[in-house]
Amino acid sequence: MLAGEDYVADRRLATAVFLALKLARPLFLEGEAGVGKTELAKVLASGLGRPLVRLQCYEGLDTAAAVYEWNYPRQMIEIRLAEAAGGADRAALSRQIFTEAFLLKRPLLQALAPDDGVAPVLLIDELDRTDEPFEAYLLEVLAEYQVTIPELGPVRAKEPPVVVITSNRTREIHDAIKRRCLYHWVDYPDAERELAIVRRKCPRASASLAREVVAFTQRLRAMDLFKAPGIAETLDWAEALIALDRVALDPATVADTLGALIKYQDDLATLTPETTARLVDEARRESATT
């Protein structure tokens, strides 16, 4: 299924995905940025024919943005209409305005109680960007596939969504979260798999250019860089070279396009003209022998 959606996974990752689906367990993906964690959730949604519900995490994320909130303007209108009609029963009105009709579903509640009844793929993206209290809130969601709304009680999924959680490991995620998930570390691809990815995602690249791009990028990852390029950067760079009608690497073109591959000035400064020329020469020689 993954291959059919142009996602090149190794056997360990494919096995982790299979078990997550078979056992109805959340899948926790950890790894550097740009290695395909978020893309996997998108591919799963497409391959399974399910909608994708994405919760993009950030510092300060709370239940109003992640789970639900009440439609206060609509509730106020309902109260004003009842008062204008006269004889409003306050107790009955209170019960009436705290119903599902006035509930605004945010990503977590959308995934647990979808309006169309189809269990989606729930992507909780970059969980490491949130605060620890939100992690604690997720424990009920991941263990029971439910959330508790004080005015309504627990809302439990009739069919559990497929849950994918990603982390770039900018901080450690609590063990209680990981215990509820199947864990997989998504590493940088080896040269063979990266070449297969480039050929699938950038079909306009010549065979020689694809090999040289992969060989060059693999050498960069072996250097002591602040942020090694991920597969996302490899694909961006390949597309940039295609846009310039290049069929092979040369030092001048590499120097002009490194901004698609390297994102930090200190790393760019490391790649002197001499270093760049050497890496290009090594990449071209390796490409010629494969």
Image: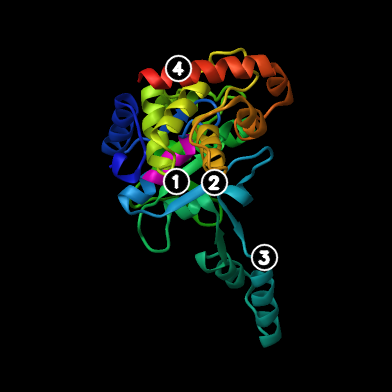
For the residue pair 20 and 250, the one nearer the viewer reads as 250
> Are the residues at dot 1 and dot 2 in contact (C-beta closer than 8 Å)?
yes
Q: Determine which residue is flagged by label 1.
A: 122
The residue range painted magenta reads 37-43
Label 4: how many Cα within 10 Å (few below 14, some 14–19, many 20+): few
- N-term mark: 1 or 2: 2
- N-term mark: 3 or 4: 3
Please give the label number shown on residue 72: 3
Label 3: how many Cα within 10 Å (few below 14, some 14–19, many 20+): few
What is the distance, in whole Å, between disc 1 and disc 2 at their CAs?
A: 8 Å
Please give the label number shown on residue 55: 2
Q: Residue furthest bottom?
A: 85
Q: Position of residue 218 (x, y in %)?
A: 49, 20
> Are the residues at dot 3 and dot 2 in contact (C-beta closer than 8 Å)?
no
Closest to the camera, between mark 1 and mark 3, is 1
Which quadrant of the view contains residue 143? top left
Q: Please, what secondary structure does the residue beneath circle 1 have?
A: strand
Q: Is residue 276 above or below residue 19?
A: above
> Are the residues at dot 3 and dot 4 in contact (C-beta closer than 8 Å)?
no
Look at the image and tell me whether residue 253 can be seen: yes
- N-term mark: 1 or 3: 3
What is the distance, in whole Å, between disc 4 and disc 2 at their CAs?
A: 45 Å
Q: Please, what secondary structure does the residue beneath circle 2 have?
A: strand
Please give the label number shown on residue 285: 4
Q: Residue at x 62, y 76 (%)?
A: 89
22 vs 252, left or right, is: left
